[in-house]
Image (cartoon, rainbow, N blue to C red):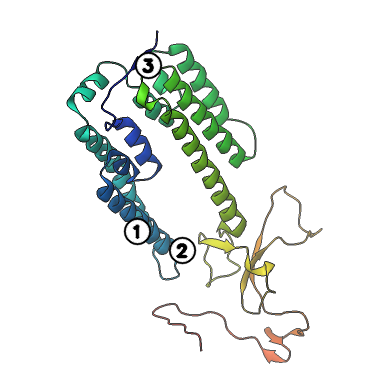
Amino acid sequence: MTFLMTTSLTSNKEPWLAVTFSKIFPGTGQIYAGRIVKGWILVAISVLQLLAAGWFLFSPTGNTLVAANVLVIFLCFIIWNLFDAHKCTRRNNDVDFERLRRQNKDPWLAVFLSQLIPGIGHIYLGKWFFAILWNALWIALVFSPLNNILLIKLVSILFIIFVVYHAYISSPSRRESSLKLIRKVCLLLMFVVVVSVLLALGVRTSVEPRYFTSSSMEPTLQISDRMLVEKISYRVRKPSRGEIIMFYPPDNPEIPNTGKVNVSVKRIIGVPGDAISIRDGKVFINGQALKNYILSTDRLRITNQ
């Protein structure tokens, strides 16, 4: 039997819904709870932390270790923010509403738990059949033999959203004031998924991480160096002399085919029209000896003239 609990205290908010909002992005739960100024401050702090992590990670003068520490701090900030969103909402609610909320299973707690692992919310509700079913299907998706990782992640997240909605409608007690909210929450989660997928595709199209395993570019590039390959520039301009590029080498009948797709990393020393020659172990470009591209990076300052 399903019970619809009503209350005339329309200003009351759902604490676990606030936690769900804060899980999407820190600070939004506090805004939902009515702590608007505090919420926007937390949103700004979150954005600054992400920008700082991105700068330390991608900037030429950045530091990956500092970026990792910033991300760890941001993770701790997210966890604290979840507890704070719940506390802010609960403190702003009327005592009668909080007493009514604790009398039965909280459908929004089931919603939050279902976002963590599909089936956990149904265990909380005592719906063991659906708990086992959804969890088994989720595990099957996670360990799917499909090679398209992005597609697997997309389907898995959409499946979680479905389980979230099912957890809410399966709750034996639902508050009338929040019946429409679950659909809005699911639509919001789907919007976040779509934006995340588009961002992932955009990043994958423009940037590709690589792990350097060859000594051919030493000492400029060392074995075990990690790099980000920018893939947009050569779509709008031609390669220039002196640039380091990554490319798929043409097939070489003298090299056995192992089935692996290898890439090469080299520096461009010649462009169309150049005459390249090697004399006495030295490379000449249009009759001029090739410049030494090995630079010391200690306190090296490069400016555009």
Q: Secondary structure at mark 1?
A: helix
Q: Earlier in the sequence, mark 1 or mark 2?
A: 1
Q: Residues within 10 Å of mark 2 (few under 14, many from 20)?
A: some
Q: Amino acid at mark 3?
A: Leu
* Closer to the camera in the image, 185 or 10: 10
Q: Residue furthest bottom?
A: 287
Residue 65 in sight: no
Tell me: 86 left or right of 153. Answer: left
Within 10 angstroms of label 3, few (less than 14), some, or many (20 or more) residues?
Answer: many
Numbered circle sitting on residue 48: 1
> What type is the residue that disc 1 sits on?
Leu
Label 2 element class: helix
Mark 1 vs mark 3: which is more N-terminal? 1
Vertically, is 257 above or below 11?
Answer: below
Q: Amino acid at mark 2?
A: Phe
For marks 2 and 3, the one nearer the N-term is 2
Q: Which mark is residue 84?
A: none
Q: Which residue is mark 2?
A: 58
200 vs 171, nearest the viewer = 171
Crowding near the residue tagged with mark 1, few <14, some 14–19, many ≥20 C-alpha atoms within 10 Å: few
Q: Is residue 147 left or right of residue 113?
A: right
Front: mark 2 or 3: 3
Extreme residue toward the front, this view = 8
- Image: 40 above or below 64: above
Quadrant for the N terminus, please: top left
Res. 179 visible in picture = yes
Percent x, y for residue 178?
37, 27
In the picture as drawn, the residue positioned furthest to the left comes out as 95
Q: Which residue is mark 3?
A: 125
Q: Residue at x 60, y 30 (%)?
A: 144
